[in-house]
Amino acid sequence: MDAMDVVSLSRLQFALTSLYHFLFVPLTLGLSVLLALMESVWVITRRPVWREMTQFWGTLFGINFAMGVATGITLEFQFGTNWAYYAHYVGDIFGAPLAIEGLMAFFLEATFVGLFFFGWNRLSRGQHLVSTWLLALGTNLSALWILVANGWMQNPVGARFNVDTMRMEVSNFADVVLNPVAQTEFVHTVSAGYITGAMFVVAISAWYLLKGRHVEIAKRSITIALSFGLIASLSTVILGDESGYIASQKQKMKIAAVEAIWHTEPAPAGLTLFGIPDSKNNVTRFEIKLPWILGLISTRSTDHEVPGIKELVAINEVRIRNGMIAYGALDQLRFDRGNEALRKTFGEHQEDLGYALLLKRYTADVAHADDTMIASAARDTVPNIPSLFWSFRVMVALGFYFIAFFAYGFIVAKRGVLQRKKGFLKLAFWSLPLPWVAAELGWVVAEVGRQPWTIDGVLPTFLSASSTVAANVWVSLGGFVLFYSALLVVELFLMVKYVKLGPPENQAVAKGGF
């Protein structure tokens, strides 16, 4: 039971640190591109107001960037401290994207952060603009490599199990990088970050307009952010649809859990708009469905069914039994490395080895598990349905809200009547936290939907943790909570301080001059 406590605590610790770190990542992604766009306008028009805008929003970007770095470093250390067996088992594959992120993306990002802040009077306009765009590129590349690593956890391609080393190893690094799950995750996550950056600028600019402060800068900032946010919100919904299609091909159980599909849906499957999942009785109560929609999203057709949870559990039970054969052959190979018959048997069933490892929760003698154990292990492949069901629906609802919000704001800004729309400006200010809510819920859908796997179909979560005691994890968890709470106070204090101070407008800027 202590081992399970360690796993649960390690999961809690990683979840809390990841969710906290992800408070800073979307804003970094969005603000970096907005800074580059604002500075581009300054270089083209030479209007001082655009330089002042870029420097002001750049100050807030710098505060957020520093906090993101401070909270991100601890995540990678946890793979060694809390998830040692995971690091041992798949470190050859998972470690490569993380190393590239550090050596390429982060160094690029950090270098041009310095040039952005200290190069205004040392670089020409064009040189500084290039530095700002490279800063934006660095932040996006950093996200790319992190999501390549995470995408591989969701869809482990380009790797194979080495019988001799008893570990997973890279077989085709190009497949790891070009993993369709990773690529759709990347574009979807980046678009969500752009929405966050846009809403941040819109909300603060709206507050200035309501207070009648820094009007010239606020008007220009809110206009460019509304345009940027509209494009990003449309992209996020479209790319989310693509993510749903990819997940339905690679992670069928996740889709079934997100939609609370207990039994296979005949074609064309309907999308549950509202319902209350009842996991105990395997039904969704008060269900309201939109016909055909799920079939079109998940299969891109009207004649393909969508498999249900019960049927997928039955399929996974078969995979567990096949994996038991692979596990038995592998166990014998430890003592007879040269036995080609055993290697052939293992090769025929190795794709299901991970499913056999689910039995480790119930018995040490995996190759001879009984039917009850196999059935229990198969049921373990169902993730937490209510949390996925509601997280997904709130996230999607917010996605459509962002489209409506930015579209309306763009229209009124284009008509030049934005300042008179006090109701919209107040709505904009109070909408500030919503992109973060959507982003965090997206993380929940992605990560909870993968359970019970650390590496989908390869390594169960309960086997991935380090051999330690719960007390050690409690101590580190408490330390993280205290440290991160202190950082949150510092972040909020600095952000509020500099927002209240506002941009240091000169006379030309205040008049809206060139």
Image (cartoon, rainbow, N blue to C red):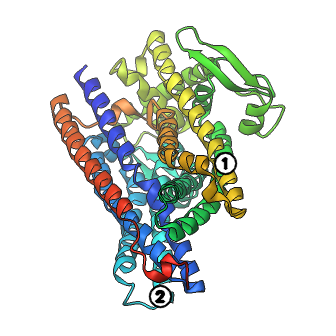
Determine the residue positioned at 77% across, 33% down.
293
List x then y, in percent, for residue 176. Answer: 52, 55
Name above or below for residue 405 compared with residue 229.
Answer: above
Q: Is residue 81 left or right of residue 409?
A: left
Question: In the picture, residue 412 is in which quadrant?
Answer: bottom right
Q: Earlier in the sequence, mark 2 or mark 1?
A: 2
**Pointers 2 and 1 in contact (C-beta within 8 Å):** no
Determine the residue positioned at 35% across, 57% down.
495
Label 2 crowd bin: few (<14), some (14–19), many (20+), radius 10 Å: few
Q: Is residue 354 left or right of residue 297?
A: left
Q: Amino acid at mark 1?
A: Ile
Q: Nearer the viewer, residue 436 or 338?
A: 436
Q: In what element is the residue under mark 2?
A: helix
List x then y, in percent, for residue 213. Answer: 46, 64
Q: Amino acid at mark 2?
A: Gln
Which residue is denoted by mark 1 in the rendering? 403
Which residue is denoted by mark 2 in the rendering? 127
Going by the picture, which residue comes out furthest to the right? Answer: 303
Q: Is residue 164 left or right of residue 149?
A: left
